[in-house]
Image (cartoon, helix red, strand yellow):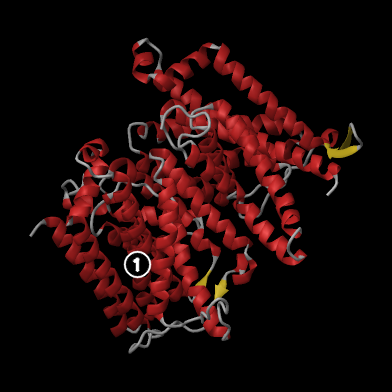
Amino acid sequence: MSLILLIEQILNGLQFGVMLFLTAAGLTLVFGVMGLINLAHGSLFMVGAFAAATVAGATGSFVLALAASLAAAAAAGALVEILVIRRLYSRDHLDQVLATFALILIFSEGTRWLFGSFPLYLNIPDYLAGPVTLPGGIQYPLYRLTLIAIGLLVAFGLYLLISRTRLGIQIRAGESDREMIAALGVDISKLYTIVFALGAALAGFAGALVGAIQSVQVGMGEPVLILAFVVIVIGGIGSIKGALIGSLLVGLTDTLGGVLLPEFFKLFMDNASATSVGSSLSTMLIYILMAIVLVMKPTGLFGAKA
Amino acid sequence: MKRETMINALLALGLLAVPLWALIADEPFYITLATRVAIFALAGVGLNIAIGLGGLVSFGHAAFFGLGGYAMGVLASHAQSYTPMMEWPFLIEGSNSMPVIWITAVIASGLAALVIGALSLRTAGVYFIMITLAFGQMLYYFTISWPAYGGEDGLSIYIRNGFPGLNTLDPIQFFAITFVILGLALVFSTLLAKSPFGLALNAARQSSERVETIGITPYRLRLTAFVISGMITGLAGALFADLNRFVSPTMFSWQTSGEIMVFIILGGTARLFGPVAGAALFIALEQVLGGLSDYWHIYLGLLLLCVVLFARGGIIGTLAGEEARHD
């Protein structure tokens, strides 16, 4: 295996990781601040992708499509929070899991009813299409490189939001003591709606960005949701920093494992069985990683509370 | 007689009456539906031991359901092709006898539950939910990418496996098998809840610290409950595979875990007959709403949402009108 191929795969892993981060950030914020497990987070990812594909189809503008994905997912998130989610904060996790599982059914079938079962396509805009040459002569798709940059920018933006703004102070205060900040006159239910809509918007944004690489279809959110769960469990629930590190770990492990494990088994097996053993193991690798992290640190790498 | 006991008796009679009526009316389709209810209810009875009695919200019971299914698929496919499963170090042949398959399914899912439980129970709360989910997904992806037993396409078995003295291809006889097993599981689950073990487990769910101070280790209780729970759900998986004569990775999917949970919640968490009521309602809705609209999952979702938000005790809780014994 050549070094160039390896670097390409590392970049792919990074790209996958930062997109996971956009989804996982919302999930971990909602859990950290409101103590809620939201299975419907993947549906918001899907809503963003569908909104982007529809707007891009109508106007032809990728930037407008991204704006639409943010707006649609934030609106869907706020609506769901006001109608359903806010009744669940005081419930136990079992009720939360079930109610948001019900929301997935409603979102998925509703989208299928509106858009049909056939996938939609979202094209990469011309100015981002094609490869660029990186130092060392590596050809890499410009769009994927842009995704990495956007993801890191959003991560930095979130860091500033949480550490430097009034909203960020309220979010952090809400995480540590919600009664106290309500007593200090912060409108807690408005804060919850804002946090939920923010998480939803990030997930929808990720859906639109990833939708240009894959196809946009019903059910695209659930695999991402499960991976985002793995990420926040590894990183520690409620920690944005944990989500970032967890995402990159999961992204790199998954991508590199798929490439390196079959190669590794080829050292002492014949080609066909090395490929089959290697690829079976590599699909399980991130779950093995998660199990190892949890056995060593039951609350994740940066988790404070169980 | 308590109201809940009456409802339970009515449910058991109803589950028996539908296939008997279908037999007389010559509508074998309804016998198959009742068989599905019995099997799903059995899976739910298994999960209810973990969730209702032990307070362990496992979102990965599809792992055991799927392992039970694949125990049947693997054994029966070897019997079907007359190839041994393993020749070294000792010879293991395939099998198409239900009792052998059930024992294999129960042992396989029990061992898996032991490993998954031992690791997962180190965590609690939301971490436990997610790590069980992750283990389920791990097995799901493993079966998809492992080509020896059909991979993504699954395995078809041409003839339903046999049970000594019965013709399992006759729908009513197969129903009788599932009904008896469900009945046994319900009796077992009642006895378990009343046993010293069940009482200690229930106490550990309510107050872990208190149980610890009197010298009982909650971890061991929970692990045992998790293993028993996984074994029953695994048995249900083997029966489900035999009903369809087909196994596929879908049995391992997280939607399956979610559905088994839905049976319990619809029926009423920690109620003995909760899974029976929930599975019956689920199948009935699937038939009625599925006939009305292709998008019946929307209505299922809305109904589920209403049950969680407004009717917290599920069907049995609402009808019986009193707190669950284990709440």
Q: Looking at this rendering, what residue extends furthest in the front direction?
A: B89
* Chain on which label 1 sits: B
Residue at which label 1 appears? B37
Residue A145 in percent (x, y) is at: 78, 34
Say whether residue B167 is visible: yes
Q: Is residue A194 left or right of residue B45?
A: right
> Where residue A49 sits in the image (x, y, percent)?
64, 40
Percent x, y of residue A57: 73, 41
The kind of secondary structure element at disc 1 is: helix
Q: Which kind of residue does numbered mark 1 sit on?
A: Val
Query: Farthest left residue?
Result: B1
Residue B189, compared with residue A177, is above or below; it is: below
Mark 1, Cα crowd under 10 Å, few <14 / some 14-19 / many 20+, is many
Confirm whether residue A102 shows in the render. Answer: no
Asked if B167 appears above or below A7 in the picture, the reply is below
What residue lies at 37% left-to-right and 53% top-to-bottom?
Answer: B262
Q: For residue B141, which quarter of the picture?
A: bottom right
> Which quarter shows the C terminus of chain A?
top left
Q: Residue at x 55, y 53 (%)?
A: B138
Q: Measuring 44% from the left and 37% from the top, which residue is drawn there?
A: A37
Q: Is residue A244 left or right of residue B325?
A: right
Residue B230: quarter of image:
bottom left
